[in-house]
Image: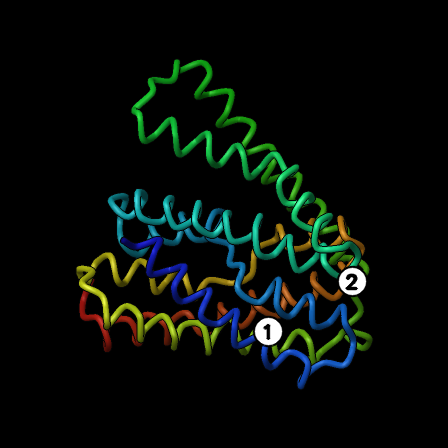
């Protein structure tokens, strides 16, 4: 149920962004970034470790399944919005279907659903590959970040994205969580996953579709700083609406 509530909140805000993006931005690429990036949190690199730190190791099953739900959102909705700025509808859908990450996610879900045993050596190899991909992503992010200049940053885009990610989305998340029958523990995990900063993977997608990767990098930086400043208040909000976890 936790990934469903997560997706309910995210998809609800997507419709809001589609409606209001044209009123906020005149540049088509800014609108694309605003819609495709604003809701993609770093549920893997930050979400899972933060979940362990705040809620203990028993939160891993919930943060992991939410991470998979977030990945499906990235490889379906975010990719579509990035691609449609440069391709036709047919080519945009094709660009989604040809991404290996989407099929690997389906494969991983099937393995877990059918309880397929994985040899420890294969598991270790996959684990090493995951760590290596994280390092590569951070290197790419660092390369783009080194070229970002504070004076020339697209502040309007970055601040609007942070407004959506760190204020509007958590507020919508609180509404859906309170309407659900989730336990206070699971509800707290879901809310925290909605509050975490933007994913570094957004830079890769922006670079892949030539959609202002430096502006996306700056938005991730602002989002991360905003999250760091708001973390204490986020914990207070979760305890106020949900209760102790």
Q: Quadrant of the C terminus?
A: bottom left
Q: In this figure, what is the number of numbered marks?
A: 2
User: For numbered disc 1, what is the local secondary structure?
Assistant: helix
Q: Quadrant of residue 65?
A: top left
Nearest the viewer among 157 and 133 is 157
Q: Residue at x 32, y 44 (%)?
A: 60
**To which residue does mark 2 refer?**
212
- Which x, y percent locates residue 200? 61, 53
- Which x, y percent locates residue 232? 37, 72
Q: Residue at x 49, y 69 (%)?
A: 227
- Cβ atoms under marks 1 and 2 closer than 8 Å: no
Residue 12 seen by the camera: yes
Q: Residue at x 24, y 76 (%)?
A: 241
Q: In the drawing, does residue 124 fall left or right of residue 141? A: left
Residue 141 seen by the camera: no
User: For numbered disc 2, what is the local secondary structure?
Assistant: loop
Residue 202 sits above or below residue 150 on the image? above
Nearest the viewer among 183 and 19 is 19
Q: Tell me how far mark 1 sits from mark 2, CA to CA.
A: 19 Å
Q: In the drawing, does residue 179 fall left or right of residue 234? A: left
Nearest the viewer among 148 and 170 is 170
Residue 39 sits above or below residue 57 on the image? below
- Which x, y percent locates residue 63? 36, 49
**To which residue does mark 1 refer?**
18
Residue 108 sits above or below residue 67 on the image? above
Q: In the drawing, does residue 123 fall left or right of residue 82? A: left
């Amino acid at each position: 149920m936790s990934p469903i509530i997560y997706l309910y909140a995210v998809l609800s805000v997507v419709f809001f962004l589609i409606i209001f993006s044209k009123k906020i931005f005149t540049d088509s690429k800014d609108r694309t970034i605003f819609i495709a990036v604003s809701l993609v949190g770093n549920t893997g690199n930050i979400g899972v470790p933060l979940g362990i730190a705040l809620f203990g190791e028993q939160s891993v099953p919930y943060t992991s399944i939410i991470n998979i739900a977030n990945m499906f959102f990235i490889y379906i909705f975010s990719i579509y919005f990035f691609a449609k700025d440069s391709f036709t509808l047919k080519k945009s859908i094709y660009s989604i279907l040809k991404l290996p990450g989407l099929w690997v996610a389906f494969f991983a879900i099937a393995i877990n659903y059918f309880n397929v045993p994985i040899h420890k050596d294969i598991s270790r190899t996959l684990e090493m590959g995951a760590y290596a991909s994280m390092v590569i992503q951070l290197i790419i992010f660092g390369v783009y970040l080194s070229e970002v200049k504070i004076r020339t940053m697209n502040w309007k885009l970055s601040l609007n994205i942070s407004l959506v990610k760190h204020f509007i989305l958590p507020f919508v998340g609180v509404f859906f969580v309170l309407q659900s029958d989730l336990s206070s523990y699971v509800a707290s995990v879901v809310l925290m996953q909605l509050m975490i900063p933007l994913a570094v993977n957004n830079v890769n997608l922006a670079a892949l579709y030539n959609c202002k990767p430096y502006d996306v990098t700056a938005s991730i930086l602002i989002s991360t700083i905003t999250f760091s400043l708001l973390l204490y208040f986020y914990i207070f909000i979760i305890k106020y609406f949900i209760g102790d976890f």
